[in-house]
Structures are given as structure tokens and as C-alpha cells.
Image (cartoon, rainbow, N blue to C red):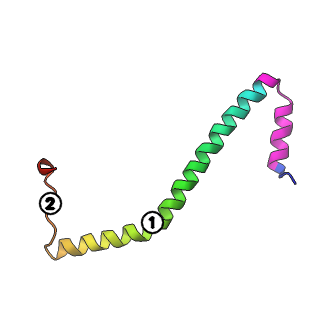
Amino acid sequence: MESTATVTMKKMLETLPEQFQNRVLEYMREYIEDIQEETKWAESFSKSQSNLISAARQARKEINEGKAVPLDVERL
């Protein structure tokens, strides 16, 4: 069963000449791929967020204990 959004887009596309339908389709394809990529990154980030917090806490602890040294860019 098609969603309301799908039916609406389909009806809107049908009102356009075919060459414009193809242009809109290509634009929508790229747009959907971008959204899928953003969703993938958001999910990945949310899964790693607890690890990032843990690493930040560990770094803060090492700084407070004097175990950390400032980064020397010349030594990289």
C-alpha cells in the first residue's frame, strides 16, 4: 500500500512533461541518498557517543593526575 506522500508525489510528477519528471526523479534520488547517508552517520554517532564520553572522562582524569602532556605539533 502506498503512503499518502508517495501518492501525492506520483500525482504531482504526472502533471509534468516527461523530461521534467526525469529531472525531478534524479533530484529526488540524490536527495534521498543524502538523507540516508545523514541517517547512517547519526546512527553511528549515537552508538559511539558513550565511548566518546568515556574517552573524554579518561582524558580529563589523566590531565588532573598530571599524566597528560600538551601536544607538541613539531614532534608529529
Which comes sooner in the sequence, label 1 or label 2? Answer: 1
Give the residue displayed 13% in from the left and 64% down from the top. 69
* Place of residue 62 in the rendered image (x, y in percent of width and height, measured from the top left): 20, 73
The segment highlighted magenta reads 5-19
Indicate the amino acid at tag 2.
Pro
Number of the label disc, if any, that sits on residue 70: 2
* Residue at the image point whose x is 51% and y is 54% from the top: 41
Distance in Å between CA atoms under marks 1 and 2: 26 Å
Q: Secondary structure at mark 2?
A: loop
Q: In x, y percent, where is residue 31? A: 63, 40
- Residue 8 sits above or below residue 61 on the image: above
| Residue 44 spot, x, y in % from top left | 50, 60
Per the image, the residue denoted by label 1 is: 48
For the N terminus, the quadrant is bottom right
Three-letter amino acid code at the position of disc 1: Ser
Name which residue lies at 61% across and 50% down.
36
| Mark nearer the viewer, 1 or 2 | 1
